[in-house]
Image: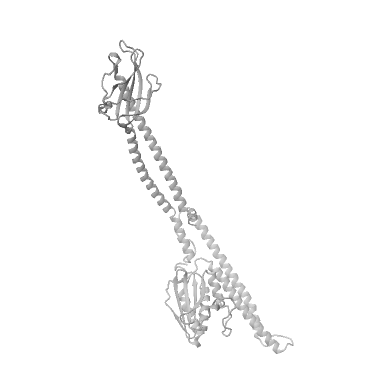
Amino acid sequence: MKLLRRRRSLRVRLLVGTLFWIAASILVAGWGLGTLFRQHVTTQFHAELTSQLDQLTAQLSTGADNAPTLQVALSDPRLTRPFSGTYWQIDRVDGGTSAAAAVGALRSRSLWDHVLALPAAKQALGDAQYARIAGPQGQSLQVVARTVQLDDTPGQAGAKFRLMVAADERFLLEPVARLNGTLWLALAVLAAGLVLAAGMQVWVGLAPLRTLRLALGRVHSGSTQRLEGEFPAELRPLIDDFNAVLAQHAQVVERARTHAGNLAHALKTPLSVLANAARTPGASQGAAPASCSSELALLVEEQVAIARKQVDYHLARAQAAVASRLPGVQTALQPVVSGLVRVMQRIHAERAIDIRIGPLEPTLYFRGEVQDLQEMLGNLLDNACKWARHQVDVQAALEPQGLVITIDDDGPGLPTGQRAVVLQRGVRADERVPGSGLGLAIVDDLARLYGGSVALQESPASGLRAVLTLPTATPGAD
């Protein structure tokens, strides 16, 4: 799963692609430059050997009995130092009138007592032959050889000689090795710089996306209703389109809320007429007995009350469903709790319930409509006051799961098996206590619509504890 997420990451894709091409470029550059330098050094090496061979050819002459001699010694001082790595040698080749060929007839002093053995090969006069042979003290030599014929030798024309100039291969390999080491070190530094530059480029290039993510977080948390901030030109069309979608969504939500309210009022009006008619004496016409009229009036009034509560219940659900999807809506907790506590103290004044409010930070905000928060907290407080003997405690805190509000009472409590049941619509814990059985169900539905929850637990005060968890909002501009 982690590998799949990395493959879907734009940052990983950019870095992997960049690193691949950097590595490929460095390898190709290192191989190409190393090959070019080796070819250049090899060419220069052979050119130097050929130049020395040309000098040797120019200075070659013969003495008595066709013995090869040099008119002037070659100037390279390495040729006079034993086993220096630079050598020359002249072999006398059978010219038809002389004795058998003499190998090593004339050699440089650097060869000392060693004789170079060149593999036999057919070679035209004047052509250069390149070979690799073993030299003195285990040296590996690069050799350039040429066969010449001195036709102007007095009295003995046609003498042939094979001239060889050789040098140790380390004179060729060591510069190449040194350059390769320096080259790969430089390329490694260059690669590190390119990788760092690529990382910085990806980081800087994706910075607007991080800003966009923070802006979306502010919209989601309810701090603002639209994306705001400085964005590059490439992202500006996306930002404008998203803000247009948010504005259109807000309009749709407002229309849905208006329709829900209109429907509720349209239903409440005929329900009110029916209720008033049921309460009016002599409302029913005809010869029906008075007892039947009274029973009918009670039945109509009861059903009208149920219908009103159902309308209020579903209207609250519709409004909450609309508000929960509207970005940028937030409600401060402290004013709502204080107002509800004052109302509950008036409603339950005859019971003298002590409602205590714990410290509520002014930074505690609910991400939703104030009416929905009042509906949820009002039902929970009213339920706690109905069952409490003397005291109700209200506390709130910001937890990792969101805004957590706890309401404790010191009443008789509720068995564990009934705590989930009373959250269902129409279920009452005790029929003797006034109520419709919809209060806790409304709280549960509203909390779920906002992505929160309500749970009933045992209170430390031996009564019932209601824990309401709601999404929180960051205080800010609406």
Taking the view exactly as shown, the residue that stands out farthest to the front is: 100
> Residue 3 appears at what percent x and percent y?
48, 55
Give the quadrant of residue 132: top left
**Viewer-side residue, 466 vs 333:** 466
Q: Nearer the viewer, residue 441 or 45?
A: 45
Give the quarter of the image for residue 41. top left
From what the image shows, is residue 100 above or below residue 34? above
User: Which color scheme does this rendered protein use?
Assistant: one colour
Q: Name the side, left or right, on which 220 lies relative to 44.
A: right
Q: Farthest bottom residue?
A: 290
On the image, the x and y values in percent for residue 474 come to 45, 68
Residue that appears at 51% across and 78% down: 380
Q: From the viewer's perspective, tell me whether residue 381 is left or right of residue 82.
A: right
**On the picture, is 135 further left or further right than 236?**
left
Q: Residue furthest top?
A: 155
* Position in image of residue 352 (x %, y %): 48, 87
Farthest right residue in view: 287
Q: In the image, residue 315 lies at what x, y percent?
A: 58, 73
Question: Residue drawn 44% across and 50% down?
Answer: 15
| Number of on-image labels | 0
